[in-house]
Structure formats: structure tokens, C-alpha cells
Amino acid sequence: MDCTKDRITEYIEQHLKATRLKHTYSVAEEAVKLAKQYGEDPQKAELAALCHDMVRNEAPETLDAYVREFGLPERLAGNVNLSHGKVAAELLKRDYGVTDEDIINAVSFHTTGRAGMSKLEKIIFLADAIELGRDYPSVEKLRKTAYTDLDRACMDSLAGSVEFVRSKGESLDPDTVDALNYLKEKQNL
Ligand code: FE
Ligand code: FE
């Protein structure tokens, strides 16, 4: 896994803009801390975090070309926000020999979450939302909840994204709605 980590690090150092690279390392740091807090494998968390935005700075046409090359759903084309995690997950499998399904899913669903998300998926989703560079009104509260109640923190973060996306009049990914309903049900809310 160390050699995979080195190759991924080389890739992101070459492909990501400075701010995105800083965000990525900050997500990795946060993900390792959360993994330790919740008994998840810190190395898996670190690797998933390093990969999660690896193609985020590629041109939209490049991402669309990957969407078609990998046979991903057509609705992802033209939507870099939704496609970048799915494309990264495919690259991990094809070019980096990553076979751990949990790492692949954590990368694939980092933007949306999904019903039945695993502990690692929740950790990456949250680390992305609360890393130290993030600055939005509810982030401080979310940072605290993240270290006391993983499900609750994911739920709060998802609820915030749903509200944000709706306020912009954009359409919500069904996985986000499913993830939110799943966590609500899990907590009997
Ligand atoms: Fe992302
Ligand atoms: Fe990110």
C-alpha cells in the first residue's frame, strides 16, 4: 500500500492546484484522526483521502471523456462535482491496483454519501467537510460532533448540503437523499 501511496502522492502533486493540494493533505490528516477515534484503519483512511479529489482539477472535457471511457452513468457527464469521485474510484482500480472495495467506495461516494455507508465512507465524507481549511457557519459545531458521534455528524453535514443545494435551485443526487434518510432512520429521527 505504501507504493500505491507514493504513486498517488506523485499524481496529486502534479495534477492538483496548490489550494486543492492543501485541502487534500488536510483531509488526509483529519481522516487519520477520525480513523483512530473510531477504530478504523488509519492507512486506509489516509490513502482514500489522498485519492478523493485526485482528478478534481482536470478539465471538464477530460472528466467527461473518463465518464464515457469507464462506462459511468451519462448523468455524470457535464457535472464535475459528481463525476470526480466516481472517476477517481475507477482510476484507482485500473491504474493503481487498488482492490479494497471500502477504499474504492469511500472515494466514489465522498461527495454524496449513500444509504448504508461504511465507517470508512463516513470518515472520508466528514473529513472532507471539516478539514481545517473549511470555513462555513456550522463547521465548528460539526467538528465537535465529528469526534463524539460519527453518524450524527454525517447526518448534520448531509442535511446542510441538502439545504445548500436546494437553496441554489440545483438538483440533488439521489444518493445524498438516500444517505440522509438512512442515517435519520438509523437514529430513529
Ligand atoms: Fe471532492
Ligand atoms: Fe475534497
Image (cartoon, rainbow, N blue to C red):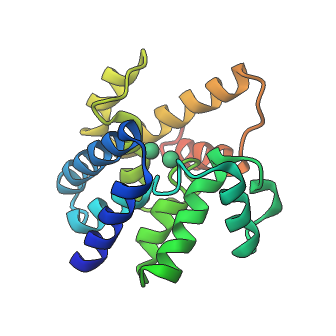
Query: Percent from the top left, x then y, of residue 13?
Result: 33, 55
Residue 119 shows in the view: no
Q: State the residue at coordinates (72%, 25%).
A: 166
Residue 67 shows in the view: yes
Quarter the C terminus occupies: top right
Q: Residue furthest front?
A: 14
Question: Does residue 34 appear left or right of residue 18 in this picture?
Answer: left
Place residue 11 in its image quadrant: bottom left
Whether residue 117 is situated above or below residue 133 in the rendered picture: below
Q: State the residue at coordinates (63%, 50%).
A: 59
Query: Percent from the top left, x then y, of residue 93?
Result: 50, 80
Whether residue 71 is situated above or below residue 49 in the rendered picture: below
Place residue 108 in its image quadrant: bottom right
Question: Does residue 42 appear left or right of residue 88 in this picture?
Answer: left
Q: Nearer the viewer, residue 15 or 143?
A: 15
Q: Residue furthest top?
A: 137
Query: Percent from the top left, x then y, of residue 181?
Result: 62, 44
Question: Does residue 168 appear left or right of residue 186 in this picture?
Answer: right
Count the marks: how many? 0
Q: State the residue at coordinates (50%, 52%).
A: 110
Quarter the N terminus occupies: bottom left
Query: Percent from the top left, x then y, of residue 2?
Result: 21, 76
Image quadrant, ligand 2: top left
Q: Residue furthest right?
A: 74
Q: Nearer the viewer, residue 63 or 116?
A: 63
Q: State the residue at coordinates (57%, 73%).
A: 90
